[in-house]
Image: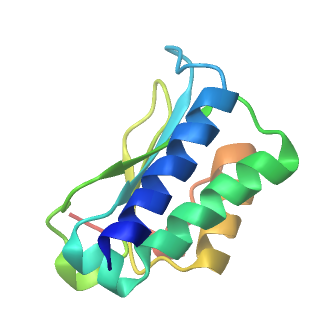
Amino acid sequence: MTIAELNAIRDKMKKVSADRQPATPDSIKIVVGMGECGVEAGARKVLDAFLGEIEDNGIEKVVVCQSGCMGKCEAEPTVEVYVPGEEKVTYGYMTEEKAKKVMKEHILGKKTVAEYVLKD
């Protein structure tokens, strides 16, 4: 990935963050692993899919952010979902389609997508 591509992602995230309300204690947090192996495996498309779903559907109280390596290189792209009052869920081998399903079923439907969950 080039510096220009990384800067474009940063700029897009800044705009999305500026357009949305800040995180609150009851916000759901989605963290997309954007380490080198994650980006190489397609994490940028996964990140964009989550952001697109939020924007297209006017979803509130969901914060999407990036992290570096999550230590699960063999399962990239990886995503962690933090729902207040619940255990963290880590999804692996994510794609744009899987991100949309996680958004629909887990974030909106409040049901973990078991077939995508990585076991510790």
Residue at the far top in the pictured view: 25
Residue 93 picture location, percent across and down: 41, 81
Residue positioned 32% across, 80% down in the render: 1
Pick whichever, 78 or 52, lies toward us: 52
Residue 99 picture location, percent across and down: 60, 67
- Let me know if residue 110 appears in the view: no
Count the numbered circles shown. 0
> Coloring scheme of the render?
rainbow
Residue 34 picture location, percent across and down: 31, 63
Residue 119 picture location, percent across and down: 28, 67
Pick whichever, 120 or 108, lies toward us: 108
With 115 as the anchor, is 107 left or right in this view? right
In the displayed structure, 76 sits above or below 118; it is below
With 98 as the anchor, is 32 left or right in this view? left
Residue at the far left in the pictured view: 71
In the displayed structure, 45 sits above or below 28; it is below
Query: Which quadrant of the rendered structure holds the C terminus?
Result: bottom left
Residue at the far front in the pictured view: 4
- Let me know if residue 98 appears in the view: yes
Q: Quadrant of residue 39?
A: bottom left
Residue positioned 64% across, 66% down in the render: 49
